[in-house]
Image (spheres, grey):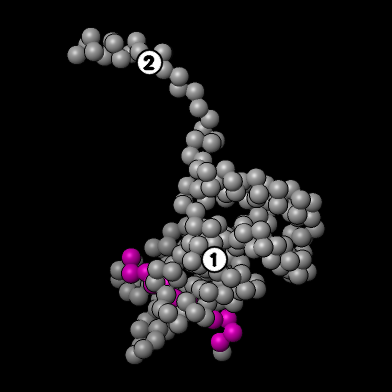
């Protein structure tokens, strides 16, 4: 056994182990898309981003035009499936695109893969009813509306979804939600929120996610 190990060790220096970690997991699709995203950011986004983020609401009409241009160039929603209007990238492929988009504070928003919308899309894909998908998920994927995610509470850190006091009590065919949420990311301008709440305070892991339409009374 020792002779075998020695032989293997001696062979190692003969193997060329040089590779570029930054491109190790690039696929043909990623290699095709990265230059397109890079060009879009350099020509359309970087030159105007400082003016855009200083007054987001005022910049919305111009940002909507850029989002429309992203759709035209087939760069929209890289995380979504092709059937849902996206590019159908795998998680690893999207990670490479996301790294590039992160070089601008507007990057993910312009291509409709920004938080919390991207996470809410995933939740609704898996658990929302057909009605909720039609009313909220489809417009969210199209970029027609924005959403927010209500988890953080004054008494608890928002990093742990188990630690919360907001409750959701089932009464007949609906839930009564009682609690105090704050620092809700992207609440300003959102069409709806997804609320994290406990269905049984005695069982901290009984977490329920519920949607609330901001246009409802």
Q: Nearer the viewer, mark 2 or mark 1?
A: 1
Q: Residue at x 47, y 47 (%)?
A: 92
Residue 104, horizontal then vertical, whole percent: 68, 51
Q: Does the segment drawn in magenta span residue 213?
A: yes
- Residue sitting nearer the eye, 125 or 52: 125
Looking at the rendering, which quadrant does residue 163 occupy?
Answer: bottom left
Looking at the rendering, which quadrant does residue 106 occupy?
Answer: bottom right
Neighbourhood count class around disc 2 (C-alpha, 10 Å): few under 14, some 14–19, many 20 upward: few
What numbered label is drawn on residue 12? 2
Residue 148 against residue 102 in the figure, above or below: below
Report helix, strand or loop for mark 2.
helix
Report helix, strand or loop for mark 1.
loop
The residue that mark 1 highlights is 85
Q: Mark 2 vs mark 1: which is more N-terminal?
A: 2
Q: Residue at x 35, y 13 (%)?
A: 11
Residue 22, horizontal then vertical, whole percent: 54, 35
Viewport quadrant of the N terminus: top left
Q: Is residue 208 left or right of residue 137?
A: left
Residue 65, horizontal then vertical, whole percent: 73, 66
Q: Does the segment drawn in magenta span residue 157?
A: no
- Residue sitting nearer the eye, 182 or 147: 147
Q: Residue at x 41, y 78 (%)?
A: 129
Residue 17 showing in the rendered view = yes
Q: Is residue 124 left or right of residue 42?
A: left
Give the CA distance from mark 2 to mark 1. Answer: 47 Å
Residue 165 showing in the rendered view = no
- Magenta highlight range: 205-216
Q: Is residue 84 left or right of residue 104?
A: left
């Amino acid at each position: 056994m020792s002779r075998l190990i020695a032989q293997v060790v001696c062979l190692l220096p003969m193997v060329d182990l040089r590779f570029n970690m930054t491109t190790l997991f690039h696929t043909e699709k990623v290699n095709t898309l990265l230059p397109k995203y890079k060009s879009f950011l350099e020509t359309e986004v970087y030159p105007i981003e400082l003016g855009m983020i200083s007054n987001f609401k005022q910049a919305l009409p111009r940002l909507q035009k850029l989002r429309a241009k992203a759709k035209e160039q087939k760069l929209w929603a890289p995380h979504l499936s092709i059937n849902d209007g996206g590019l159908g990238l795998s998680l690893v492929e999207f990670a490479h695109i996301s790294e590039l988009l992160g070089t601008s504070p507007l990057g993910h928003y312009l291509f409709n893969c920004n938080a919390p919308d991207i996470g809410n899309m995933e939740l609704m894909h898996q658990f929302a009813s057909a009605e909720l998908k039609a009313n909220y998920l489809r417009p969210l994927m199209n970029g027609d509306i924005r959403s927010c995610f209500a988890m953080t509470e004054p008494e608890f850190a928002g990093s742990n979804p188990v630690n919360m006091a907001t409750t959701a009590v089932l009464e007949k065919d609906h839930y009564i939600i009682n609690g105090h949420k704050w620092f809700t990311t992207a609440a300003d301008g959102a069409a709806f929120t997804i609320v994290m709440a406990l269905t049984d305070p005695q069982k901290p892991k009984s977490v329920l996610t519920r949607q609330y339409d901001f246009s409802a009374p």
